[in-house]
Image: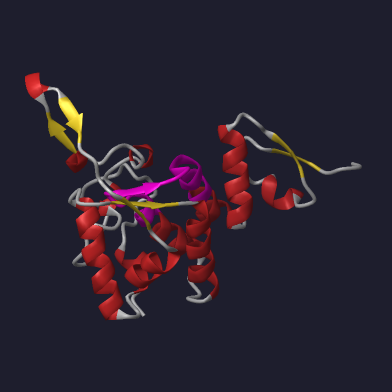
Amino acid sequence: MWDCARETASCSSPTATGSSCRRFPRRSSICGAAFRSPVRRISRPFAAGYGSGEGGRRRKVSVERFFADTNLFLRYLTNDVPEQAEAVEALLRRAAGGEIRLVTNALVIAEVVWALESYYRLPPAKVSNCVLAILNTPGLEVVESEVLFQAVLWYGEKRVDFADAYNAAWMVQRGITPAYTLDEKHFSRLDGITALVPGS
């Protein structure tokens, strides 16, 4: 099995560039792109989907959108079925070139985390690197990308379940900092969250 986390960028920030970030072999311009773009830019219209109109103004060019399922990312990251990984790479290149737009969501990311952790037995830090690569893939729109980015960082750094990290990031984005929970141990590790236990 190809260890995606060993080959992807080793930096902790998506804005890091230069020699401190290693890239995917053969796929450096596609999945992850060495984390060179801030995650908040993922959901912006892909540059190749725009053209110049009259007077130098830019006009939007319609690009068809397609949902990207969990197994695409797993095949590509692990390369355990090479022919499928190559097919996914070709699809990602089409998206990176602006020919199509790929869209995915938080549940897909959660499934990727679960599979890499449970089936492929990768530790959280390596799973986090793999998911960060997905979140920074050009031509891929990730719904709630900023929430997911924070969740993935907490998951990799704070030793908490991904679901707890996601819920905490979702709360913080909406200005909700106190949380009633029976899992005080995990929530108390997350910055900005006040864990409250009913009856205490």
Give the residue at x 89% y 41%.
Answer: 200
Tell me where residue 94 appears, x and y as whole percent: 20, 57
Q: Is residue 161 magenta?
A: no
**Nearest to the observer: residue 161 or residue 188:** 161
**Residue 37 found in image quarter:** top left
27 sits left or right of 137 in the view: left
Colouring of the image: secondary structure
Task: Give the x, y percent position of residue 143.
Answer: 45, 45
User: Which residue does the image show at 34% across and 42% down from the upper left?
Assistant: 42
Is residue 82 placed above or below 90 in the rendered structure? below
Residue furthest out toward the right: 199
Q: Is residue 160 left or right of residue 196?
A: left
Q: Which residues are magenta?
A: 132-152
Please tell me which residue lies in front, 92 or 119: 92
Q: In the figure, 73 relative to 18: above or below?
A: below
Relative horizontal placement of residue 41, taking residue 109 as reference (left or right): left
| Whether residue 23 is visible | no
The residue positioned farthest toward the left in the image shown: 55
Residue 135 in magenta stretch: yes
Q: In the rendered image, which quarter contains the N terminus? A: bottom left
